[in-house]
Image (spheres, rainbow, N blue to C red):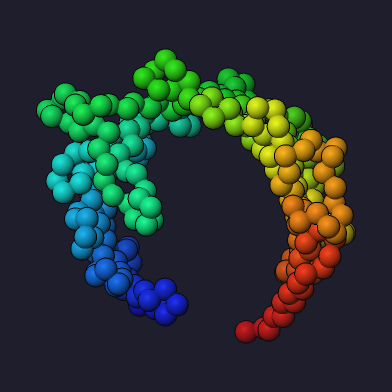
Amino acid sequence: MRVEEPLKDLKTDYIYDMQARLKRLDIYTTEGIVKVNYTHGSEPTTTITHPLWGEQKRVSYKDERGKITEEKIYHNKELVRRVLYSYTAFDSLFGKEIINFYEPTKDGKITPTLDFIFSGNKKIENPIHKKYITYFDKNTRQRTKEVVFIDDTKPLEDKIYTYTKGENNKILLQKTHYTNYETNAQTIIFYSYQSKTNMPTFVRTEIRKNENLLSYSSLEYIYQNESLWQIINQSFESPFSKSEIKTTSSNNSFTKKVSIFKDAKLIRERHYEGEILSKTIDYQYIKV
């Protein structure tokens, strides 16, 4: 199969094996041909060959349950990254230990920047070690907390999950609270649900820094006859508290999009800047 994207000056060839599994990608770019090769089996491997920065290879290792326990990443045949996974007794991901070595450059390209490399079993060149740990409720098996540590002791960031019981005692996510301890930035997401069906009715996201509200967004779901009718997406960007945010037409920090559905199909979008309608998009369908 070949896919051409003229606006991006991009062309991609997809090559499959006799079992209809993806075997290779040939991506034709302005920098040359990028080749991506896939091998399947007990140690799945992805190899990317770029005309400018060389070869990157990712090898995955699985246990007898088919769970990936380790990944190794090589750059030009040098082992530069390892990812170790651990699981709970009920096969949920418990922890992930990862060392990053890629950094984006100003022109958007990805170049290999080594935080450390392996020399035998010894780590050298300024190791930066991150450990990801996920905590679960023993009874409900719902994840309750995720923590990222630096050097096993210093917490870098965490994410706390709060739940509530909906209809038929179904456990529903009520709030996600994410904190970055280096930047003191917080993202809080609140969820509410429709009674009886437990379908989402409202999702509110607040981004704060040092307790100051930087932005606020919401998704409101409206139903008719238990079918989705509208989704109203509103967002604010303001250094003020939520009570001081004005949704007037002169406030350019406020935007709104109303999506209207019929028979589970999107038929219209209305876009607003402040309270002024700026754009309407209508969708039409045909039967094939």
Residue in view at x 38 percent, y 27 percent: 130
Residue that protrudes farthest toward the top in the picture: 153
Query: In the picture shown, does residue 223 fall above or below 170?
Result: below
Describe residue 111's horizontal placement relative to residue 194 as left or right.
Answer: left
In percent of width and height, residue 108 lies at 38, 56
* Residue 19 point in image, percent of width and height: 30, 65
Q: Which residue is painted at 32% across and 27% down in the image? A: 128
Name the quarter where the N terminus is drawn.
bottom left
Depth check: 167 or 250 in front? 250
Residue 279: name its quadrant. Answer: bottom right
Q: Is 50 situated left or right of 275 in this image?
A: left
Q: Is residue 202 above or below residue 90?
A: below
* One can see residue 101 in this view: yes
Q: How many marks?
A: 0
Q: Residue at x 84, y 39 (%)?
A: 244
Residue 90 vs residue 70, the one in the foreground: 70
Q: Quadrant of the C terminus?
A: bottom right
Picture residue at 33% right of the left edge, 26% below the top: 129
Whether residue 226 sits left or right of residue 177 in the image: it is right
* Viewer can see residue 173: no
Residue 158: image location, x then y, percent: 54, 26
**Residue closer to the observer: 137 or 215:** 215
From the top left corner, tell me how far across and down residue 265 is, in percent.
72, 69
